[in-house]
Image: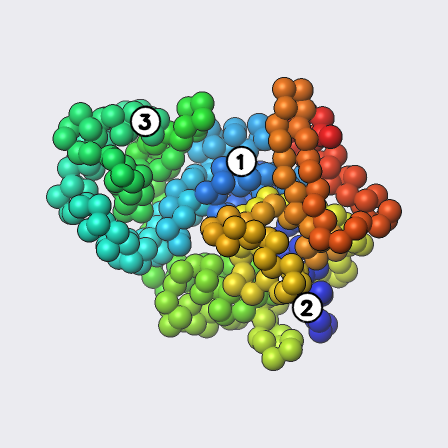
Amino acid sequence: MLTTPPEIARLRLHNQLISHSPARTPAEVVAWLGAVQAQDFAGAKWSLALRLPGATEATIDQAIRDKTIVRTWPMRGTLHFVAAADVRWLLPLLAPRIVARTAGRYRQLELDEATFARSAEVLGRALQGQRRLARPEVYALLEANGISPAGQRGIHIIGYLAQTGLLCEGPREGAQPSFALLDEWVPPTAPLAREEALAKLAQRYFTSHGPATLPDFVWWTGLPVGDARLALQLAQSALTSVTIEGNTYWLADTLPPQLPPPQAYLLPGFDELMLGYTDRSAALAPQHRPLLNPTNGGILSATMVLDGQVVGTWRRTLRKKGVTVELSPFEPLTAGQRELLEPALARYAAYLGRPVV
């Protein structure tokens, strides 16, 4: 029985497919988690691969080319990876609220319905027939048709057209994202009624991210509290709850027979283990919170996790023949902790296909 925050952290490692994963494809990982924040493209690919035994960066790139996972803006106004089979019910469930909340920014940028409609017409015509355009090409096409992409107008146009179901990202063109028509990129799927979609989302979240609280779910989805509470109620038959230190946590109604022994992991900055909760105290000591967000902005540092606890941060520097990994522990590492980190470094090296120093 769960009784302490450290036990919450260890169980989250298991349920998030980090310490144990039966997944065999990137799409299975993404579908299990519901969605994976992907504003940091390189970090998001590593998030998927560390949950997929034997996966390399090429594995994730191939899944994008195979159209089994899609990068788009379904929730919180932020890029996420979603499974292709889920994108058509996630967008109408979550994106309209984000579009409505962004109305003020649209007005600042002088983006109105007529501009969005004209942009949709131009891009819809240009992308027909499975065509793709890199982001600079999208901006140039808009400019050529009298629609200025300057001053963040371009990315807001792309985001709006993705959130309303016209566009999605395709494979990268060098360092640039490319865009395609969602209807051509992803096969059609049967629509879900709103309550069915809410129940499905809640079950996905609490099964994969649990133990988690209702406020965690509200933060992660961006849903109004009332809708989130309804979603939890609709999914409740597949879940169980436990109260720890006055907080009610929800999770799948079956617990693993035993959790694995302590292991170390190198997680990217926006990994779901950190970003999937509004309350990170089960894994992150209060005195270390500022070190995870040193600029007090929207960037979260990559984390070193040992037995469910964040023990430091790390960063990589790509070299011609390898990659340098700089570890910044919060406190000096013991010999045993350093030994546990060796498999994590080896796993990252195998993922990149280059030696790690």
The picture quadrant where one finds residue 210 is bottom right
Q: Which residue is mark 1?
A: 42
The residue sitting at the top extreme is 320
Residue contact between numbered discs 2 and 3, judged by CB atoms under 8 Å: no
The percent coordinates of residue 307 (x first, y second) are 74, 55
The residue sitting at the front extreme is 295
Residue contact between numbered discs 1 and 2, judged by CB atoms under 8 Å: no
What secondary structure is found at the residue carrying circle 3?
helix
Along the line of sight, the residue nearer the viewer: 352 or 304: 304
Between discs 1 and 2, the one toward the N terminus: 2
Mark identifier at residue 90: none
State the quadrant of the N terminus. Answer: bottom right
Q: Which residue is mark 2?
A: 5
Instruction: Tell me which residue sits at (73%, 37%) in the image.
Output: 345
The percent coordinates of residue 286 (x first, y second) are 63, 65
- Cα separation, mark 2 vs mark 3, equals 47 Å
Amino acid on which disc 3 is placed: Pro
What secondary structure is found at the residue carrying circle 2?
helix
Q: Residues within 10 Å of mark 3 (few under 14, many from 20)?
A: some
Indicate whether 127 appears above or below 157.
Answer: above
Instruction: Tell me which residue sits at (71%, 73%) in the image.
Output: 3
Q: Residues within 10 Å of mark 1 (few under 14, many from 20)?
A: few
Mark identifier at residue 136: 3
Amino acid on which disc 2 is placed: Pro
- Cα separation, mark 1 vs mark 2, equals 30 Å
